[in-house]
Structures are given as C-alpha cells and as structure tokens.
Image: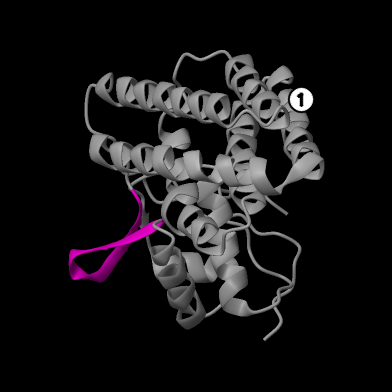
C-alpha cells in the first residue's frame, strides 16, 4: 500500500505483452502501437533494457522486434548503435508525401477497376468510423483512421508489391508525421469531407476525378505538415525517457 510519501508510478510508454503468436512479433506490435499513439515520440531514444523490462521479456527478442520496426521505417539506428524513433523533418515529409502522390494515383485506378461495390462499402465503413471520431473531437483517433482508410485503399488495389510499399515505406512514417504535427490548426471535419469526396468519385468510377481529389488531399496535407514544422521555434527535440504501460496479456514462449 502506498503511503503519503511514496513516489508516483512512472508513466509507461508501451504496453507489456501477456499473450502472443510469437514473442518477437508481439514485442514489435507493442512498440509499434506506442509509436503510433505518440507515447514514444519522434526522435525519442529507445533504451532496450528499459523497454524489455516493461514488456516483461528479454532483450534478445526486443532487439529483433526493433530490427523489424527498422524495416518499416519506424525505428532508426544512430551512431554507437543506439536506436531512436524515426524523427520528422522537412525532407522526410517531402519523401513521404511525394511517394504517396505517385502510388495512390495508381492504387485508386486499380480500386475502381477491381474492387466493385463491396470495396466501396469497405471504404465507407472506415470513413464512418473516422467521422464518428472527428465528431467526438478525438484528433488522435481521427488520424489513426485516416491512415486506416488509405491502408484499405491499398488493400483493395489487389497489388501485393504496391501494398508492401505502403506498409514498409509510408504508413508508419505518415503516422509519425501526424503525431509530430498534431497541433496543426485543422478542423477535424475537413479530412472527413475530403475522404467522402474521394469515396464518391470511386463509387462513380471516375478515375480522373478520384486521382485529382487524392492528389489535392495529399498536397494539402504536405503543405500543412511543412507549415507546422516551419512554425517550430526549434527543431523537434527527442522526448525524455518514459516508462512503458503494461497490459493484461501473457507472453507465451
């Protein structure tokens, strides 16, 4: 029992593992979720000993998990072999959004050709969740569902290499950009409205309009992210060490 002078428990940054398909993939998922929800912020140093303790695993599977996240562009290795969450700067924003603009034009063309009404229904389901999150004022969840919408778009394109390019080169980095620029002055209903227009163009099988709407949506997001980064008085600083949050799952070896 804690007394009046007892120190408050430190806030955790990732959830511990209690039940998983494999130790490495579960550790990767736990750290990935903490990066996605911003508990492990852009540029933050990842201390293996601390993370392993909080996850309730040894350092070996955690090291493998961080290696997997490195392939997704979420974690980078810096001199002396320390690891950090991918940081955000003007160049990384340029790369993410310029690649999106190329790939998503092709993705939407394939969706219109292949997905049919079932595919449109799936996009509308994600859009409905995004609308509910926006109406509730939940900026973080709206951003997560924004990424989920585009993930579904790539899945419906039925092109394994295209989908792999999204997951390995864009999706995670895009979520980090959203976390770093979350304070941008943007009404939450605006991205919802833009996605609604895209879905309507896909439903009407208007390839040119869908591609144009996507390009404008990506350009707007790029300008907003760059403006937010330029507005910072100093470069984005790494967040100080944090604890990771435990869950009720059980690790199976």
Figure quadrant of the C terminus: bottom right
Q: Residue at x 48, y 38 (%)?
A: 105
Q: Is residue 190 magenta?
A: no
Q: In the figure, is residue 188 to the left or right of 218? A: right
SS class, disc 1: helix
Q: Residue at x 57, y 13 (%)?
A: 187
Location of residue 129 in the rendering, given as x and y in whole percent from the top left corner: 76, 32
Dividing the picture into quadrants, the one containing residue 135 is top right
Q: How many marks?
A: 1
Q: Residues within 10 Å of mark 1 (few under 14, many from 20)?
A: some
The outermost residue toward the bottom is: 253
Q: Is residue 195 above or below residue 165?
A: above
Q: Residue at x 63, y 64 (%)?
A: 16
Location of residue 188 in the rendering, given as x and y in whole percent from the top left corner: 60, 18
Location of residue 42 in the rendering, given as x and y in whole percent from the top left corner: 38, 44
Q: Is residue 195 above or below residue 32?
A: above
Can residue 50 be seen at all in this image of the molecule? Answer: yes
Q: In the figure, is residue 208 to the left or right of 247? A: left
Q: In the figure, is residue 195 to the left or right of 120? A: left
Part of the protein shown in magenta: 74-86
Dividing the picture into quadrants, the one containing residue 83 is bottom left
Q: Is residue 78 magenta?
A: yes
Instruction: Report the front residue among 237 and 135.
Output: 135
Location of residue 7 in the rendering, given as x and y in whole percent from the top left corner: 55, 47
Can residue 10 be seen at all in this image of the molecule? Answer: no
Figure quadrant of the N terminus: bottom right
Classified by dominant secondary structure, the portion drawn in magenta counts as strand
Q: Which residue is mark 1?
A: 132
Dividing the picture into quadrants, the one containing residue 54 is bottom right
């Amino acid at each position: 029992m804690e007394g009046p002078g007892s120190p408050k428990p430190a806030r955790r940054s990732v959830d511990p593992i209690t039940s998983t398909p494999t130790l490495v993939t579960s550790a990767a998922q736990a750290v990935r979720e903490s990066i996605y929800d911003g508990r492990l912020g852009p540029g933050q140093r990842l201390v293996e000993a601390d993370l392993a303790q909080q996850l309730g695993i040894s350092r070996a599977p955690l090291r493998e998990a961080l290696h997997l996240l490195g392939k997704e562009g979420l974690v980078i290795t810096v001199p002396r072999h320390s690891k950090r969450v991918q940081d955000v700067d003007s160049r990384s924003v340029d790369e993410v959004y310029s690649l999106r603009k190329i790939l998503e034009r092709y993705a939407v063309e394939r969706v219109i050709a292949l997905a049919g009404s079932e595919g449109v229904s799936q996009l509308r389901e994600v859009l409905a969740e995004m609308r509910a999150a926006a109406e509730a004022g939940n900026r973080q969840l709206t951003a997560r569902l924004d990424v989920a919408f585009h993930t579904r778009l790539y899945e419906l394109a039925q092109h394994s290499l295209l989908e792999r390019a999204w997951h390995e080169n864009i999706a995670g980095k895009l979520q980090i950009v959203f976390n770093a620029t979350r304070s941008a002055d943007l009404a939450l209903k605006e991205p919802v409205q833009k996605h609604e227009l895209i879905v309507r163009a896909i439903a009407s099988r208007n390839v040119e309009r869908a591609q144009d709407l996507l390009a404008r949506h990506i350009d707007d997001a790029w300008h907003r992210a760059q403006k937010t980064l330029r507005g910072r008085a100093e470069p984005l600083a790494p967040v100080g060490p944090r604890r990771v949050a435990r869950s009720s799952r059980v690790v199976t070896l």
